[in-house]
Amino acid sequence: MSTIVIHTPTLTDAQLSRLTDTFGTAPVAQANHFRLTSTMPKDALTDACHSLSQAWQLDLNLLPESFDAQAVRLLISDMDSTLIGIECVDEIADMLGIKPQVAAITEAAMRGELKFEESLTERVALLEGLETQALDRVMQERLFLNPGAEAWIDGLKARNIAFALVSGGFTYFTDRLKDRLKLDHTQANVLEVMDDRLTGRVKGAIVGAEAKATFLTSLCAQYQIDCRQTIAIGDGANDLKMMHAAGLSIAYHAKPAVQAQADVSLNYGGLDKVLDFLA
């Protein structure tokens, strides 16, 4: 028996009828979404969810049969374009008037067309000489949480699920978000600074795809849980290794390559819709 999550608090009579006819069972209303179960073959269910999602412009997801929502103890999230609505490195570059150049590299890396570590080295090198106060400007003037972020984090805390923020971006931002949102764990890259200016280098090993996956597994060891008791969410190709390691992988408004490999996708709703998987 397969479970489908329909990420909306309301459905029209026509939509309810269409869902019942398509899947053979009627949707059941939950607190903020609907669920239904079906015995249809997985491929047919996936195709039907995709078709209705596009037609109705709302998220429908087929949950993996192996996913146990009650067992989840850790969620690990990407930062840029996932928890927050910007790519920090692009906005930092804008302070030097080179945002288009840097953003093009970022976009290619997120699509998986460039090796992340090399692309980050290239982008950070372009920031050489920038005063560190520019980072504060990005934090104060440009950084914003994606819709539903605070309700999502509050919901996880209410369920006693730890939150880890991991980023191919920079500790300047993850540290401040950790304090602001009372997050449990963070990991990111450290920008090298000399005389209050960026040197154009990252200190230490770069947090890329492999490091993100390792962060997840190390936290599982710390909490003495199995990786199947985790959820990983991201939008870019450098998130895929940690997503593959998790019990449930969520593509959030993600690149096509990421959506193709994730268990479920959120393309229309906000981050609070992640809680629908935990009902």
Image (cartoon, helix red, strand yellow):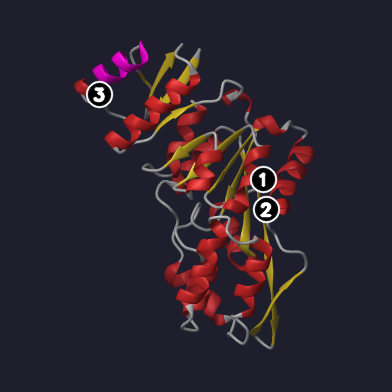
Residue 122 as seen in the image, left or right of residue 6: right
- Secondary structure of the residue carrying tag 1 is helix
Expressed as whole percent of the image width and height from the top left, the position of residue 48 reads 37, 25
- What residue did someone put label 1 on? 241
Q: Which disc, if any, is residue 209?
A: 2
126 drawn magenta: no
Separation of residues labelled 1 and 2 (CA atoms): 6 Å
- What residue did someone put label 3 on? 15
Q: How many marks?
A: 3
Q: Quadrant of residue 269?
A: top left
Task: Identify which amino acid the numbered label 1 is placed on.
Answer: Lys
Contact between labelled residues 2 and 1, with CB atoms less than 8 Å apart: yes
Task: Identify which amino acid the numbered label 3 is placed on.
Answer: Gln
Please report the residue visible at 45 percent of the width from the left and 56 percent of the height from the top: 145
Magenta range? 15-24
Separation of residues labelled 3 and 2 (CA atoms): 40 Å
Question: Could you say which is closer to the camera, residue 209 or residue 145?
Answer: 209
- Secondary structure of the residue carrying tag 2 is helix
Q: Give the main secondary structure, helix, strand or loop, of the magenta stretch.
A: helix
Please report the residue visible at 31 percent of the width from the left and 14 percent of the height from the top: 20
20 drawn magenta: yes
Expressed as whole percent of the image width and height from the top left, the position of residue 222 reads 78, 40
Please report the residue visible at 41 percent of the width from the left and 27 percent of the height from the top: 47
Expressed as whole percent of the image width and height from the top left, the position of residue 13 reads 20, 20
